[in-house]
Amino acid sequence: MERIRIIDSKDHVGEIVQIGGWIANKRSSGKIAFLQLRDGSAFFQGVVVKNEVPEEVFETAKGLSQETSVIVTGEIREDSRSKFGYEIGIQNIEVVGESNEYPITPKEHGTDFLMDNRHLWLRSSRQHAIMQIRNEIIRATYEFYNSRGFTKIDPPILTSSAPEGTTELFSTDYFGQDAYLSQTGQLYAEAAAMAFGKVFSFGPTFRAEKSKTRRHLTEFWMIEPEMAFVKHEESLQIQEQYVAFLVQSVLDNCDYALDVLGRDKDLLKTYTELPFPRISYDEAIELLNANGFDDIKWGDDFGSPHETYIANHFSKPVFITNYPKGIKPFYMPSPEDRDDVVICADLIAPEGYGEIIGGSERAIGYENMKQRIEDNNLSLDDYGWYLDLNKYGPVPHSGFGLGLERAVTWISGIEHIREASPFPRLLHRIYP
Ligand code: 4AD
Ligand code: MG
């Protein structure tokens, strides 16, 4: 007999099959038991009818506790009453592993309790849906860049450099030398772009951010494309195509997960329409000041209420371009006609989800870069290799970083970034 996964039920209607899974929930009366089955691919209902099975099978069904693992045998049927569309008429149940007093019951639990039990909370249908969307975004990312001739490169995680500023570093001892957990793979991606033209990195990055917000993790995954001979405008086009591709891929391949989360698919569809609106930092400050935000002036970085206002103003992902030099990293160049701003953009997601991409053109020129490194109190010993790139055939290049968990949070439409990571690392949480 064939063992199938729940997700493949549609190909087995009318067949007797086996499914290995867990009991997510159960309802039973004297004559019938409904088992909510979960096998990692999906959730669906198993029905055990007392009159149609041997007595001990019905007794087993009635006694099953939540999260007991089982192999059930039965017939796949269409089930028009359920969202999933199929169920299994159970004929036999083999208990594989007992489960007693499972702590996460279908009733409401507080967030701290759920986070302490993250290893179990992951089994719930909502978490399953979010992880399906995360998985699709990862898959679509590889498809997008691989089909456009990018080479994936893997920057190191242990580094001696701190390109995004020195205040948010996790440091460690590297055989007597200071080392840091990588904040970004960018500088290495730039070196690789000079070797391979178009590259992307996709790996874990770390920020010792003391911020306890619904957008910040201390460990998150970042996708960082870097492109030789590409100026800022072309980079913005790639960014918006990439983000629209992610949204479309989730719409195409995660329909059920979006339903589980109650995400508005028509709204998501509007985020695939290009181009995304653009507004300069200067204009954004004017817009805010004209609409009651007197707490912000030119030169300040945006807080989340500001980003939310701007995003709501456009109802689409929006690029804010040309930020003041003082609030951006050392590697961003200024345009020819102004030296108080830099050639960069942040992409702000709609619906209050905040920044999902930060990117820029990159400064080039040996003396120019040497000066920047010195002005930022960075050590030429640590950045010698990066400076070298300006000695041997430097070219204009641009790149950007998209935070995976920020994208998952936004596209899934969930409240808090902690649910976008299987085992999130937050300010006060490193367990489980
Ligand atoms: O804007 P950031 O700091 O940019 C960089 O690190 C550049 N070096 C990227 C590049 O140009 N290659 O971070 C990029 C993105 C942000 O837009 C956000 O999506 C995400 O990384 N991010 C975080 N996500 C979760 N938790 C945090 N603490 C994050 N900090 C940044
Ligand atoms: Mg940023």
Image (spheres, rainbow, N blue to C red):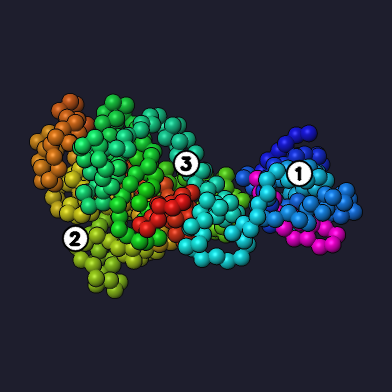
Residue 232 in sight in this render: no
As rendered, which of 186 and 159 lies closer to the eye? 159
Residue plotted at (26% across, 56% down): 280
Magenta stretch in the rendered image:
26-39
User: What x and y, as percent, mark residue 59?
Assistant: 82, 54
Quadrant of image for the N terminus: top right
What residue did someone put label 1 on? 94
Report whether 154 appears left or right of 167: right
Q: Earlier in the sequence, mark 2 or mark 3?
A: 3
The residue under label 2 is which amino acid type?
Answer: Gly
Which mark is drawn over residue 299? Answer: 2
Q: Residue at x 20, y 54 (%)?
A: 327
Say which label, 1 or 3, has the lower sequence index. Answer: 1
Q: Closer to the observer: label 1 or label 3?
A: 1
Residue 242 lies, with reference to residue 65, above or below; the image says above
Residue 407 spot, x, y in % from top left:
43, 50
Viewer-closest of 430 and 314: 430
Camera-side residue of 55 and 48:
55
Tell me: residue 298, above or below residue 295: above
What type is the residue that disc 1 sits on? Glu
Q: Locate residue 222: give its quadrant.
A: top left
* SS category of the residue bearing label 2: loop
Q: Residue 367 at what x, y percent from top left?
A: 9, 36
Q: Is residue 33 magenta?
A: yes
